[in-house]
Image: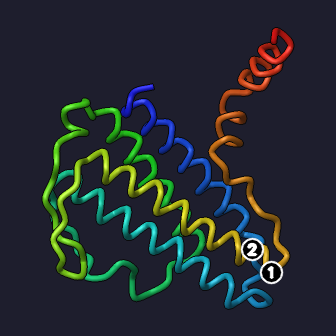
Amino acid sequence: MSASALLRTLFNYQTWAHDELLERMEGFDPELHRDARHTAIRLINHCLVVNQIFAAHLVGKAHDFSMDNTEHTPTLKDLRTAVATLDRWYLDYLETMTPALLAERVPFVFTDGDKGFMSREEMLTHVVTHGGYHRGEVGRLLRQESRELPYDTFAVYLHQAEPSRRLQGAQEAQAA
């Protein structure tokens, strides 16, 4: 599998995982789970901001962020809309990438003022892995509040996205 194909698969997975997690976050009662709900929204909002920052880095544009979260906490509905929109942007962006563009290293500045220099492929990988880390934190909050967890694993996503994989695996096992 090429890096381009793997990144497209990983960003489709991220889109699916965000949707699953944000759906589960709807189960937080705004009063009963106030603190956990607020923390979860802040964590996913942080991911959104970081993803917006890296989207700007990828296309060589300035962004308006001076920190890696916003001062105000969005509503869960607004967060879901913004996350879905940016996930779609990344999927569309990947369709424009060639191996040469993915390998190109891009200079940028982090919000703390430190300089960065990464390939587009590395930046895209950072976006996916960073999001997985924070989705895991939100999963822990869901568990602490006895909420149902999403099945946020790459293997689950692949088998839901391509159910024939399970059949193929069973056929391979029988043939062996």
Q: Is residue 82 visible?
A: no
* Residue at the image point whose x is 32% and y is 41% from the top: 93
Q: State the residue lying farthest toward the top.
A: 175
Q: How crowded is the residue under tag 2: few (<14 C-alpha within 10 Å), some, or many (20+)? A: many
Task: Classify the position of the C terminus by image quarter.
Answer: top right
Q: How crowded is the residue under tag 1: few (<14 C-alpha within 10 Å), some, or many (20+)? A: some
- Left or right of 119, for residue 133: right
97 over 167 or under it: above or below: below
Q: Residue 174 carries which label?
A: none
Q: Mark 1 points at which residue?
A: 145
- Left or right of 173, for residue 35: left
* Residue at the image point whose x is 72% and y is 69% from the top: 26
Element on which disc 2 rests = helix
Cβ atoms at labels 1 and 2 below 8 Å apart:
yes
Amino acid beneath label 1: Glu
Residue 56 lies, in percent from the top left, at 24, 59
* Residue at the image point whose x is 48% and y is 73% from the top: 45
Real-space CA distance between mark 1 and mark 2, rounded to the nearest whole angstrom: 5 Å
Q: Is residue 137 visible?
A: yes
Amino acid beneath label 2: Leu
Q: Which mark is residue 142?
A: 2
Residue 83 lies, in percent from the top left, at 49, 60
Residue 91 lies, in percent from the top left, at 41, 41
